[in-house]
Image: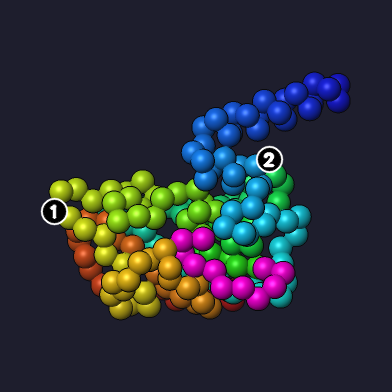
Amino acid sequence: MKRTMNLLVSLAAAAVLSCAGAAGASVAAGQPIDGIRCEQMEGSVLHIHQHLDVRDHGKPVTVPDDVGRPIVGQCFYWLHTHTPDGIIHIEAPTFHTFTLGNFFDVWGEPLTKTNVAGAKPKQNERIVVWVDGRRYDADPRKLELTQHLDVTIEVGPPYTKPVPFTAWNGN
């Protein structure tokens, strides 16, 4: 019975890894990403939250629950989500600077000039990033994640100034 269970777990892990890209494979296995470890418990020294809203031509792209909480690894990355509301949780064992690029790497999704979590601009369109309601023209991968940072990424029109996120619910 134990051997059968081990085989099933191994097969499930192989299936997850074969479906994921290079970054996704590391996430699925709980391997360190950008120096960020996946540990058995959430860290308690640094505990802050941010909000991420991704829009693909006006339609929401869900930031899913359990980003950074791989089933196979049974661990928590220091950057993770609990619910599909776009709230990012940073719960680290030490003080550290994290970026939006780190979160996307843990998520296993691209954040480039031509692809944001699978949302791609069409010809003559662009990606617009808003930070706390203001246009952000620098590299979004380098954006430092600070307490209650509110990030909206719009792929393609409309390029509308976002409504500020206020539903922190104690986070």
> Between residues 144 and 42, which one lies in front from this camera angle?
144
What is the x, y in percent for residue 154?
29, 61
Position of 57 relative to 22 (above/below): below
What residue sits right under mark 1 in the picture? 124
**How many labels were placed on the picture?**
2
Q: Is residue 94 magenta?
A: yes
Q: Which quarter of the figure is the N terminus placed in?
A: top right
Q: Looking at the image, do the residues carrying marks 2 and 1 touch, with CB atoms under 8 Å apart?
A: no
Q: Residues within 10 Å of mark 2 (few under 14, many from 20)?
A: some
In this picture, which residue range is highlighted in magenta? 92-102
Please name the residue shown 68% across and 54% down the image: 38
Q: Nearer the viewer, mark 2 or mark 1?
A: 1
For the point 71% across and 63% down, the residue is 42
**Horizontal and vertical percent for residue 2?**
86, 25
Its colouring scheme is rainbow
Q: CA distance from mark 2 to mark 1?
A: 41 Å
Which of the 4 image quadrants contains residue 133? bottom left
Amino acid type shown at disc 2: Val
Q: Residue at x 53, y 64 (%)?
A: 88
Q: Secondary structure at mark 1?
A: loop
| Residue 30 placement (x, y as % from top left) | 66, 47
- Earlier residue among tags 2 and 1: 2
User: Horizontally, is 109 left or right of 97 in the view?
Assistant: left
Residue farthest to the right, as pictured? 2
Task: Judge whether residue 85 can be spotted in this image.
Answer: no
**Is residue 79 covered in magenta?**
no
Query: Looking at the rendered structure, which numbered label has been put on residue 72?
Result: 2
59 versus 163 height, above or below: above
